Image (tube, helix red, strand yellow):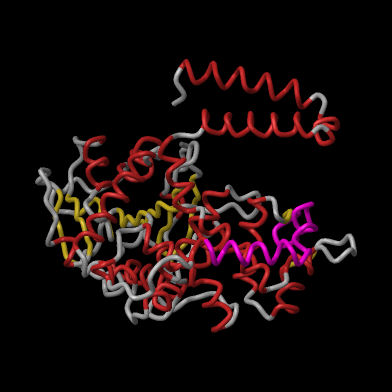
Amino acid sequence: MISKWDSGVASSLIQEIASINALSQSIVQDEASRVQALNLARKLVNVLEKPEDAALQNAMSPSEIVVARIAVDLNLYDLIADGSGEAKKVGQLAAVTNADPRLLTRILRLLDCMGWVKQLDDDSFAPTPITEAMKGKALQACLKHQYVSIFMFKSLELSAEEVSPSFDIGFRVFEKLPEYFRKFGFQQPSDENSGPFQYAFNVDQPAFQWWQQDPELSENFNIFMTGVRGARPHWVRWFPIRERILNGVSQDEKDVLLVDIAGGRGHDLHRFIEAFSDVKGRFVLEDLPVVINDYRSANARIEPLKHDILTPQPIHDARVYFLHHVLHDWSDDASIQILSQIAKAMKPNYSRVILGENVLPSRKCPINKARLDWAMMALHCGMARTVSQFDILCEKAGLKLVKYWPPPGDGDGIIEAVLQGDDLSLLNDSQP
């Protein structure tokens, strides 16, 4: 929340920008006015942006220069700004570049956020002044030179034990992304054992498994996830839990109310129990052995259970199977496998799946969401998804997506799903 002092500063800056904006044409021609307006706009962002958001924006920002650099390799600037005056569809660009249309969509989505292209509809993109400028070989050469200068200062002989947590991991993978695509083709990575992360570190195991070998890396990741989740509007505060989950739930204390799958240190379970301490039922926290072995909790209601999400779900007939920031770490095939294992354990007309995810809009995507999408691809061959993409995953896993609940503000959305064939009239359709 913006403080009263910050609100006053923001209001003053808005007034200054508005007065300059009234003379917008002269601003473009008057360099001093243009620079003044630009500096005021940047100050306004600093005033309005939450500190945790500013940190996350910077953490995800390498994706922008990487995507801009990959676009040079694909000749996208010249193809889009070809002088025809017509927008280019993803399919057209895919045919010319021989690139995966899904990968192209992700590239163009982030370029749109940056203002380097303009998205007109779900799969059409037009040039902007930056696109036109990037047709020039000088600017492309500048981008290539700066990319090398920024990223190529790190040793490529580091082991897991020698890598500084998070920062060096992400930067090293992003550093190698253009090289990875040039070598293996511009296709969407989907094998978590041989993706960009594995190429960058010359390993053949998933990123999570690799960095869990190092206690410092694992600890840093858990701290990171706790902090990120704590800074956003938590789903327990706004999702209609009593209407959608607790109404009609079993009152037998032996029955499982909520399974938090790949739940780390149980951040979400703790918040749920705090908010609904009166409810009956069991709460199960599932994660890999390396996580559960280190789990410590003062809440006796949380039952830790070692579980690999790609294997059969051991808890049957629970009311809710909850996954928070899980599927964006996985490819479509792996995500379908994960959801299918859950579906086999669900009780018809009773159990449901709740996904807390960074859900992408089909257009006008916020830059932080597009950045996160690229981070997931680089590290895990995963991806952030639109509602329609989640719908497809659910259908292929034997589930039915019944509702998408958009978040208040910039938090995570909620995907609610049940078994295919369930009586949807049993669901309460209350709005948040």
Q: Quarter of the image holding residue 248?
A: top left
- Give residue 128's position: percent from left, percent from top: 78, 53
Note whether 248 is above or below 42 in the view shown: below
Q: Image quadrant of residue 287? A: bottom left
From the viewer's perspective, tell me whether residue 190 is left or right of residue 13: left
Q: Examine the structure image and report whether residue 136 is included in the region drawn in magenta.
A: yes
Classify residue 336 as left or right of residue 94.
Answer: left
Residue for point 47% across, 16% down: 5
Mainly helix, strand or loop, the magenta region? Answer: helix
The one of 158 and 289 positioned closer to us in this rendering: 158
Q: Is residue 53 above or below residue 216?
A: above
Please name the residue shown 27% across and 70% down the image. 160
Q: Nearer the viewer, residue 360 or 110?
A: 110
State left or right for residue 84 relative to residue 321. right
Q: Position of residue 4 (x, y in %)?
A: 47, 16
Q: Is residue 425 highlighted in magenta?
A: no
> Which residue range is magenta in the image?
120-149
Q: Position of residue 329 (x, y in %)?
A: 40, 64
- Is there any visible trace of residue 394 in the rendered image? no
**Position in image of residue 403 (x %, y %):** 49, 51
Q: Is residue 129 left or right of residue 363?
A: right
**Closer to the camera, 59 or 381?**
59
Q: Is residue 121 above or below residue 55?
A: below
Furthest residue in direction right, as rendered? 84
Residue 348 seen in this snapshot: yes
Depth check: 1 or 123 in front?
1
Image point (65%, 77%), residue name: 99
